Image (cartoon, rainbow, N blue to C red):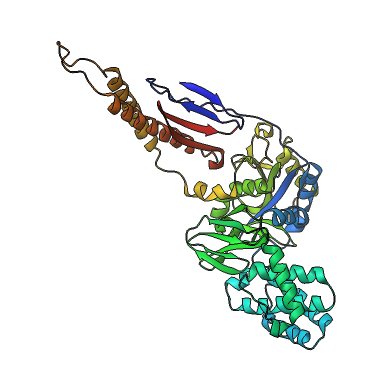
Amino acid sequence: MQLDRTGSGSVILGHAVRTIVVIAVMLFAASAEAAPGDGIVVESYSGQRPEDANRLLSPVLDELANRGYVAGPEVVGRRFEQKVSRPSIVENGLSDAFAEQVEKGHKAWIAGRFDEAVKVLTPLVDSAHANPGAFAQNQPLREKQLKALIALALSYQRIGDQDATRQTFGEILRSFPDTQLSRASYGPDAFNLFEEVKKQTTAGGKGKLVVKATNDAAVVFINERFQNAGGSARAELLPGEYRVFVQVGKQLSRVHRVNVVANEEATVTIDADFDALVHSSPKWSGFLFADAGAREKLESTYAAAFANAINARGVVLVGIDNVRGRPAIVGSLVSLMNGREVRRASINLDPDPSVDKLRALARFIAGENAAPGIDIQLAGDINSVPAGGTGEGVQIGDLKRRDQGGTWGGWKFITGGLALGALGVGAYLLSVDGDCTDDACTYQRETSISGWATIGGGAVLAGVTVYLFIRGSGESQAQRSAYVVPTSGGVYAGYALRF
């Protein structure tokens, strides 16, 4: 048996020659206080958000802000949209008059009214980029989008804004890579500038974008263009930022903005189920569940994933729910490492609670002792919550595995028993290799090959057993890996754990 410790904190268990493998897993637990100052508040509701939610939650959010937990769409929502994803269709959506307005702007460009064309077309292009999901549902609209981009780029050129012209040409090349600008239709100046931008954009080479959806039925779109069905896509693209989303049935995911670099590979994983529950708007940010059952099952795990995705150091859930059959304001502190609630309490809304009582609820959630009148459901010690903000806790890409649950718990005992049996048999076969088969020692046993083969199989089963035991603990898959590596003297079976 040999033990090696890597720089990333991995523990490697090895199998040496003629040594029966004994597998031990050492777990290291670190404790740190919750980190006010980098925490966020995420709202959560079933059905619809109550109209008076702002008034009712305001004292709670103010008190949490005093303890370093920021809230609101301008901070939490904007941060999530910048780092992770945005709605695929905003509240007002793409105008029904989009195609008609594009024609209006195009005619203004043809007539030489370039300032008017820019004024009409710029908000149309911005709206198209803010509502990419609308083009998934109506792909022919992309022709109008291209028409708007070309007329806008050429209008910028005619008014002397070369930077805007180049930027718009770059967007055309990324979103409509097969586009050719006709010299006869658009003139030599437009043709030459477009070709120059194309040459500059392609000079450094293309990059690769890999899209993985957690649902195999997902259809992938890149810059509103259908890319592939089957839950994944791989594309070679010009360098630049791309809008990526998927569609499962009629359900659109959020839009993930990915920067592709020349000669490098970028990967994005999209969980459409998670995206469907995230809400970010100018009014509020958080989760909107279809019913109380889904909320109870998922909200704490999803809140941890939400917070880890933006490198928050802590997360508090607040919302309005029914507690023991009565409407109440509910708050909970969630561990970023495992997605479990550490503290949870509520205050009934009938009668309307005082501001002092609502502030007391916030103080309890943040770690203080409870004041009278607070209904406590869970009162864990916040000092036992591991520090977050490292991106190593609950991850969005791991949510589907968590939701579906694990495999049957008995498999680890079956594989463990088989592993021990195989290792024992293999050790026995090696121990009798070369022994005489009779008193005269006419023949000698040749059992080394079968012995090593049996031990190799036992080592593989041992690695599977370790994996199944750890998998059952609910730890994030991003934190661990089980493996078997052949060597000249046998095999190494191991398990890596980041701590």
Q: Is residue 413 visible?
A: no
Image coordinates of residue 265 in percent, x first then y, are: 60, 52
Q: Is residue 333 visible?
A: yes
User: Which residue: 55% across, 57% down?
Assistant: 273
Residue 423, quarter of picture: top left
Residue 114 higher or lower than 318, as above or below: below
Residue 163 location (% of width, % of height):
81, 68
Residue 112 x/y as whole percent: 81, 86
Specify whether 359 is left or right of 395: right
Question: In the figure, is residue 10 to the left or right of 166?
Answer: left
In the picture, the quarter occupied by the N terminus is top left
Where on the picture, by quarter, is residue 308? top right
Q: Nearer the viewer, residue 262 or 132?
A: 262
Q: Furthest residue to the top?
A: 439
Q: Nearer the viewer, residue 340 or 467?
A: 467
Q: Nearer the viewer, residue 245 or 348?
A: 245
Residue at 76 percent across and 69 percent down: it is: 166
Residue at the limit of the structure toward the bottom, as seen here? 111
In the displayed structure, 96 sits above or below 232; it is below
The answer to which quarter of the image holds residue 180 is bottom right
